[in-house]
Image (cartoon, rainbow, N blue to C red):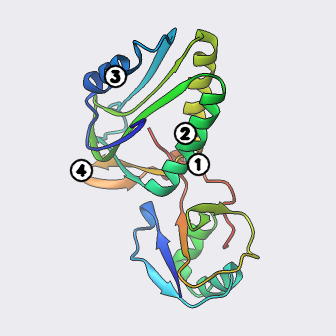
Amino acid sequence: MAKIEFLGPLNREPMEVDIQSLNDLKEMFKEDKELQEWLEICAVALNDALVCSLDVKIEKGDKISLLPPVCGG
Amino acid sequence: MALELYDGSLHVEEITNRWFRQISEKNYGAYIPFIGIVRDENGISGLSFDIYEPILNSWFDEWQKRAKKEGAYLFMAHSRGDVPNHTSSYISAVVSPQRKVALKLIGDFVEDFKASAPIWKYDLIDGERVYAKSRSTALKGAGLLR
């Protein structure tokens, strides 16, 4: 199982999912209409490093974070 | 600690004076603080912030390495939660032997901070937090799961 964190204004509780890759996660989220709008603009981090490819293998205990657009200061 | 996070407004004098005392004996020629102040605009009573610390820490560490290569050193302080108008939510500073290095570095650092630091800003309007979506910047790789 991997843990999904929804950061900042996504404001959702974390969830545990049984997936093999980020592609699986993308498929899983297709059914979540509310999240689709956010996914257009969210970056993705695997174990606190930003990733740019869906072909990433997900291991047991991995942490996946969704990061909406940022504005510090 | 070069990176400091606080609940609520920053105590500007305490922070910037402490940083100055920390470096004043170390023969740096320039100390350039940048202090961000919350402006009263668009009917807000203040701003509010969420921070994701693990990625903020690694982002800051990379910048500290970059500064070190130029003989410089960075400080940063940021608020979590609510920050009323006319108080400070963000301070960064660079120290360097040379003025030119420090001036360039503080500019580059603050620009990248705006674009890359995992911090989310909300306007405080009538006691509610409203995500400042239109002023926010998508991070590298955004849209991967769409």
Q: CA distance from mark 1 to mark 4?
A: 25 Å
Residue highlighted by disc 3: B16
In the foreground, B58 or B24: B24
Residue B40: percent from left, percent from top: 32, 32
Badge 2 and badge 3 both on one subunit = yes
Query: For the residues carrying marks 2 and 3, which lies nearer the camera in this image?
Result: 3
Chain that bears disc 3: B
Characterize the local packing of mark 3: few (<14), some (14-19) or many (20 or more) Cα atoms within 10 angstroms.
Answer: many
In the rendered structure, the answer to whether residue B138 lies left or right of residue B27 reads right
Residue B136: percent from left, percent from top: 53, 48
Say which amino acid is labelled 2: Phe
Query: For the residues carrying marks 2 and 1, which lies nearer the camera in this image?
Result: 2
Characterize the local packing of mark 4: few (<14), some (14-19) or many (20 or more) Cα atoms within 10 angstroms.
Answer: few
Residue B130: percent from left, percent from top: 37, 54
Residue highlighted by disc 4: B126
Residue highlighted by disc 1: B137
In the rendered structure, the answer to whether residue B19 lies left or right of residue A59 reads left
Q: Upstream in the sequence, badge 2 or badge 3? A: 3
Residue A58, relative to residue B101: is it above or below?
below
Label 2 with label 3: CB-CB less than 8 Å? no
Chain that bears disc 1: B
